[in-house]
Image: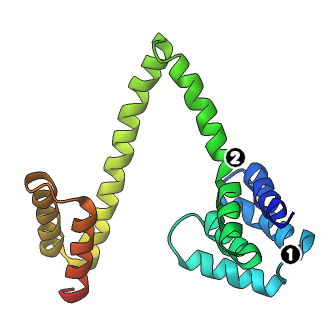
Amino acid sequence: MLYWNIFLAFLIPGILGYGGGPASIPLIENEVVQRYEWMTVQEFSEVLALGNSLPGPIATKMSGYIGYEVGGIPGAIVGVFATVAPSLILMIFLLGILYKYKDSPKVKRLTLYVRPVIAILLGLMAWRFFAESYEGIGIWQSAFLIVASYLLMERFKVHPAFVILGTLVYGGFVL
């Protein structure tokens, strides 16, 4: 019964929390503090602060931590699954519809419209990263990291995770 309660405590905010993690935080607080009384308001605020300090989606971090506190490792797994289940189910359903109509001229036209938008958004994101890098470490360091990353990934086929790790080490020691 405990795992069912953990599942419901995070599934309901996942369904009703339209707008992502920040929109579902009050719903999670209601379930965890008010309904099931697993935590006090103070403890929940500490979990929220911890979740905000870590990278990644806030709702999944909170559900994993609270699920672990309440039900151990199985509770964490149930909590995280309940948080992502609504999006997962909806994506599977929508992908099924998209796959069914993949040869439709309307779907093909939609794909043609979406690809340039994604390319532009990725380009803007890269530009913002470059601008922040330029302001933070200067043009020469930024250029060096860009060229080195490009050569490592494209010419020498180094996995991007190792390139990222290398730039972190470089930044830690040199910058």
Residue under numbered circle 1: 33
Q: Residue at x 76, y 85 (%)?
A: 43
Drawn side of residue 65 relative to residue 109, left or right:
right
Residue 71 spot, x, y in % from top left: 75, 73
Drawn side of residue 38 relative to residue 51, left or right:
right
Residue 8 spot, x, y in % from top left: 82, 57
Q: Secondary structure at mark 1?
A: helix
**Label 1 environment density (alpha carbons within 10 Å; few <14, some 14–19, many ≥20):** some
Residue under numbered circle 2: 86
Check residue 137 in the rendering and tell me which mark sits there, or answer none: none
Q: Quadrant of residue 72?
A: bottom right
Q: Residue at x 30, y 56 (%)?
A: 126
Q: Residue at x 71, y 55 (%)?
A: 82
In which quadrant will I find the N terminus? bottom right
Depth order, front residue of 78/58? 78
Residue 66 spot, x, y in % from top left: 72, 74
Q: Are marks 2 and 1 in contact (CB under 8 Å)?
A: no
In which quadrant will I find the C terminus? bottom left
Residue 57 spot, x, y in % from top left: 57, 63
Q: Earlier in the sequence, mark 2 or mark 1?
A: 1
Q: Label 1 amino acid?
A: Val
In the displayed structure, 125 sits above or below 1; it is above
Q: Quadrant of residue 21?
A: bottom right
